[in-house]
Amino acid sequence: MEKKTTVPVTAIVLGASGRGKLYGDYSLEHPDDLQIVGIAELVELRRNMYRDKYHVPAGNCVATWEEMLNRPKFADAVIIATPDHLHYAPCMKALDLGYDILLEKPIAQTEEECRRLVAYAKEKGKIVGLTHVLRYSPYFLMLKEMVSSKRIGELVSIQHFEPVDHVHMSHSYVRGSWRDSEASTPLVLAKSSHDLDILHWIIGKPCTKVAAFGDLAHFKSEKAPAGVPARCTDGCPVEATCPYSALKIYYRDRTWLYVFDLPEDYDEQGKVILENLKNGNYGKCVYHCQNNQPDHYMMLMEFEGGVTVNFSIEAFTSYSGRRTRIMGTHGDIVGDMESFTHTDFASGVSKTYRADAVDALNYEGVGHGGGDAGMIHDWIEAIRKQDASLMSTPLDESLESHLMAFAAERSRKENKVIAVEH
Ligand SMILES: NC(=O)c1ccc[n+]([C@@H]2O[C@H](COP(=O)([O-])OP(=O)(O)OC[C@H]3O[C@@H](n4cnc5c(N)ncnc54)[C@H](O)[C@@H]3O)[C@@H](O)[C@H]2O)c1
């Protein structure tokens, strides 16, 4: 019988914000599997919080990824959870040093960098997992199984819809880190590399052609109501009725707060939030944000073998999640990421499958864990056994979604159908 390995994989985390903390939490929940032994984080408050909460040796807590990766290798792996524009350089450097890597999506900002990074990871023979966590979610696992088992006959086409939610759009893609597609990554990659990856995974064949349309319809200065100031805190005449008011979203409703480093006390929190709204990006009027991400985006795709897909990303919705319709020759599927209904054409029988009831369907091991935990678990096993095939999200597979996204951007900007080069 195989002896269970209990020596934890040791990892250095770069970036101690939302994603970085998730890996810290995993290490506390699974100390036999993952131990965080170094943290690089620009913001001192976050860095110190991370050191204390996740028991990182003080000597291995530094401000920048460069400083960390200038040291000789001292752990098994590096987890890259810095912003999009800081994925490529730290990943290449970590490969140079011989680390295995968990790289937050997206791989890099340009197609050329993505290709170069994937080739270099292969040359170095290192494990590089990309965080396309939806592949581990029970819902998409069930959906893939339903299509692969041919219970809808031959797959013919898919309609996939990603409602962003209007507030989420304003937070992330108008005011937030992804407001500028050049400084970060284009919306179709930043928001939807997961979706393009899932489509490619379910169809099981490469995408050959794409066409994309869409632009920024609303969040721009010419759409600003008369007399609005640069910030919601500057006495805006429409603040009380604006759905995008920063005072409403962050101060009154206290939502989307993860971007602020807040104290525990509610009143003290309020003071920090207001200070941020008066000085930082999240207090800016949505019509004056120097943003350029499209707020409606439509993409048409053809896959090898002729399967067609239409996919749209929409900012102006009151809901989020994903909606998917899958059309086969002998049945169809209609789903909303919580459940889907399969209808068999011959019998006329429809049956609904819920993602939270996966155990009943014998999807062993996916009912208890969720996407992130499943992905981290497989990555750790891949490192332990030095076998990249143990991950559902190997890097060269993940590259496909990025090639589709870059081709879509070319199509949208050049106004033509683009062949995806593999
Ligand atoms: N897999 C997913 O589903 C998923 C979900 C959300 C975000 N992401 C990706 O994960 C990455 C991180 O996301 P986040 O929401 O935690 O972002 P974030 O911007 O909140 O956090 C990044 C952290 O990196 C730090 N940082 C910036 N420059 C640095 C440097 N030179 N050296 C060290 N630290 C530095 C920042 O101070 C910040 O704390 C992004 O690329 C994002 O696209 C993936």
Image (cartoon, rainbow, N blue to C red):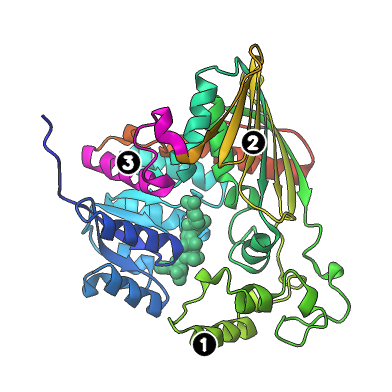
Between 347 and 293, the one nearer to me in the picture: 347
Q: CA distance from mark 3 to mark 1?
A: 42 Å
Secondary element at image label 3: helix
Q: Front-most of 148 and 188?
A: 148
Q: Which residue is mark 3?
A: 378
Residues at discs 3 and 1 in contact (Cβ within 8 Å): no
Instruction: Assess disc 2: are there few (<14), some (14-19) or many (≥20) residues with their C-alpha within 10 Å of its C-alpha.
Output: some
The residue under label 1 is which amino acid type? Asp
Between the residue at mark 2 and the residue at mark 3, the CA separation in whole angstroms equals 27 Å
| Residue lying farthest to the top in this orientation | 346
Of marks 1 and 2, the one in the foreground: 1
Q: Position of residue 371 (x, y in %)?
A: 43, 45
- Label 1 environment density (alpha carbons within 10 Å; few <14, some 14–19, many ≥20): few
Residue 324 marker:
2
- Residue type highlighted by circle 2: Thr
Residue 70 at least partly seen: no
Asked whether, in this view, residue 168 is left or right of residue 205, the answer is: right
**Relative vertical location of residue 95 with respect to residue 199 in this rendering, above or below:** below
Q: Which comes sooner in the sequence, label 3 or label 1?
A: 1
Quadrant position of the N terminus in the picture: top left
Find the magenta span and give its range.
Answer: 357-385
Residue behind mark 1: 267
Q: Secondary structure at mark 1?
A: helix
Task: State the residue at coordinates (60%, 18%).
Answer: 152
- Identify the image quadrant of residue 179: bottom right
The kind of secondary structure element at disc 2 is strand
Q: Disc 1 or 2, which lies upstream in sequence?
A: 1
Frontmost residue, 251 versus 127: 251
